[in-house]
C-alpha cells in the first residue's frame, strides 16, 4: 500500500495536515471509529467526502441537532397496509462511512442510539437485529465542550471511538493555498478512487494478523496501567483502550508496508488513542486538551520502550 499516494489524494482537499491524514488512514485500516474535535469550518465534512471517494465506499451524513431522534439515525419499522406487515425504513446509519456531524449537539438519548451499532455493527429495532455491511466506520465531529448547545458525550460512547483527532486551523501559507485552490475549482472533483471497497475489507482483515512481539504486549499493558496510576487522573484508560492501541499499531505497520508492530507505532498513536478515555480530577472535558496531552507524554516518558532490535 502506497502511503504517500493515499495521503497525496487527501491533500487535494486538506492541506498542511499530513500527520493527521496519516492517522485517519490508520484508523480506517484498523476498522475503527474516529472522532474529530474541532471548531466549525475546518474541513471535516470535506474530509469525509474525500475518504468515501478514495475508498469507493458509500457515504451518508447526519446533522445532529437538539431535536434529532434515535429513529432519525437508525431508522424505524413502518407498516405497509398493502402487504399487511411491517418493513424496515433504514436510517442513514446503514452505510459504509457515516458522518455524525456535531454529534454533541444532540440529546443523550439520541447519542445512545449509536452505542450498539458502533460496538457490534448492528441495529436492533422491535426485537429484530439488522447487520450492517462492511466496512462500517463512524466519523463523528464535535465542537469543543462548552460551545453553545453542546452535550457532553458519555464515557461509554467516547470509549467506542478508536481515536480522537483535531484538524485545527491551517497556517498562513496553507490558508493562502486553500483560498486559491477553491477560487475556480472544487478539489473534491479530483480525488481518485484508489482502493476499492472489497480490497479495503481485505486489508482490514489482514491488519488483525500482523505480528506483535510479547514485549510489545507488555509495553502496551504497562502504558495503560500507568494512565490509571497517574495522580492527576480519576479514571484511567479502559482495557478497550489497549486493544484499540494495538489494532491501530497493526494498521500503521501495514500502512508502512510492514508485517510487524514496533514500539514507535505504539508511541505515535498513544495520545490520539488514549486521551479521550481519561477522566481527569480537574474535570477537563476537552478530549485533546493540553493537560491531557501533557499527562500522556509523562506516561510515555515514564514507561521504558522495549528494545526489539536483533530479535
Image: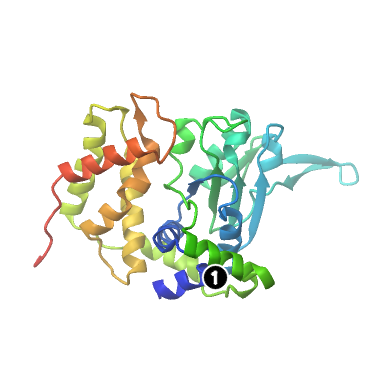
Give the answer, above or below, for where 43 lies relative to 257.
Answer: above
Q: Is residue 256 left or right of residue 75?
A: left
Q: Position of residue 290 (x, y in %)?
A: 35, 39
Q: Which residue is mark 1?
A: 12
- Image quadrant holding the N terminus, namely bottom left
Q: How is the image coloured?
A: rainbow
Residue ID at (68%, 32%): 66
Left-right relation of 221 to 59: left
Instruction: Give the total number of marks visible in the rendering.
Output: 1
* Residue 137 seen anywhere in this rendered image of the structure: yes
Query: Residue 137: where, in percent of width, then height?
Result: 53, 53
| Residue positioned 60% across, 69% down in the render | 180
| 17 shown above or below 93 | below
Q: Nearer the viewer, residue 39 or 108?
A: 39
Q: Is residue 44 above or below residue 281?
A: below
Task: Tell me the element at label 1.
Answer: loop
The local crowd at label 1, few if under 14, some if 14 to 19, many if 20 or more residues have their Cα within 10 Å, is: some
Q: Quadrant of the image for the C terminus?
A: bottom left
Residue 181 percent location from the top left of the image:
60, 70
In the image: residue 72, left or right of residue 294: right
Position in image of residue 199 (x %, y %): 49, 71
Q: Residue furthest right?
A: 82
Whether residue 132 appears in this view of the structure is no
**Residue 228 vertical position relative to residue 247 in the rendered view, above or below:** above
Furthest-left residue in view? 310
Task: Specify whether 9 is left or right of 295.
Answer: right
Amino acid at each position: 500500500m502506497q502511503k504517500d499516494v493515499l495521503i497525496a489524494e487527501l491533500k487535494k482537499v486538506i492541506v498542511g495536515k499530513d500527520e493527521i491524514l496519516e492517522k485517519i488512514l490508520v484508523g480506517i485500516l484498523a476498522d475503527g471509529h474516529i472522532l474529530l474535535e474541532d471548531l466549525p469550518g475546518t474541513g471535516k465534512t470535506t474530509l469525509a467526502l474525500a475518504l468515501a471517494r478514495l475508498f469507493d465506499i458509500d457515504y451518508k451524513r447526519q446533522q445532529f441537532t437538539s431535536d434529532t431522534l434515535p429513529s432519525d439515525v437508525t431508522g424505524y419499522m413502518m407498516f405497509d397496509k398493502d402487504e399487511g406487515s411491517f418493513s424496515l425504513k433504514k436510517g442513514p446509519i446503514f452505510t459504509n462511512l457515516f458522518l455524525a456531524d456535531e454529534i454533541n449537539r444532540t440529546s443523550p438519548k439520541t447519542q445512545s442510539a449509536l452505542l450498539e451499532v458502533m460496538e457490534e455493527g448492528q441495529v436492533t429495532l422491535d426485537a429484530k437485529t439488522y447487520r450492517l455491511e462492511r466496512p462500517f466506520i463512524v466519523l463523528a465531529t464535535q465542537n469543543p465542550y462548552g460551545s453553545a448547545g453542546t452535550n457532553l458525550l458519555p464515557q461509554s460512547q467516547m470509549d467506542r471511538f478508536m481515536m480522537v483527532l483535531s484538524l485545527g486551523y491551517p497556517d498562513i501559507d496553507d490558508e493562502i493555498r486553500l483560498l486559491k485552490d477553491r477560487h475556480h475549482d472544487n478539489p473534491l472533483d479530483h480525488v481518485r478512487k484508489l482502493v476499492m471497497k472489497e480490497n479495503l475489507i481485505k486489508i482490514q482483515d489482514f491488519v488483525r494478523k500482523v505480528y506483535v512481539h510479547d514485549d510489545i504486549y507488555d509495553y502496551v499493558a504497562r502504558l495503560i496501567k500507568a494512565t490509571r496510576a497517574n495522580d492527576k487522573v480519576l479514571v484511567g484508560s479502559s482495557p478497550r483502550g489497549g486493544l484499540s492501541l494495538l489494532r491501530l499499531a497493526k494498521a500503521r505497520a501495514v500502512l508502512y508496508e510492514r508485517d510487524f508492530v514496533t514500539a514507535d507505532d505504539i508511541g505515535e498513536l498513544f495520545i490520539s488513542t488514549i486521551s479521550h478515555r481519561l477522566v481527569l480530577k480537574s474535570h477537563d472535558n476537552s478530549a485533546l486538551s493540553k493537560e491531557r496531552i501533557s499527562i500522556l507524554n509523562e506516561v510515555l516518558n515514564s514507561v521504558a520502550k522495549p528494545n526489539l532490535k536483533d530479535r
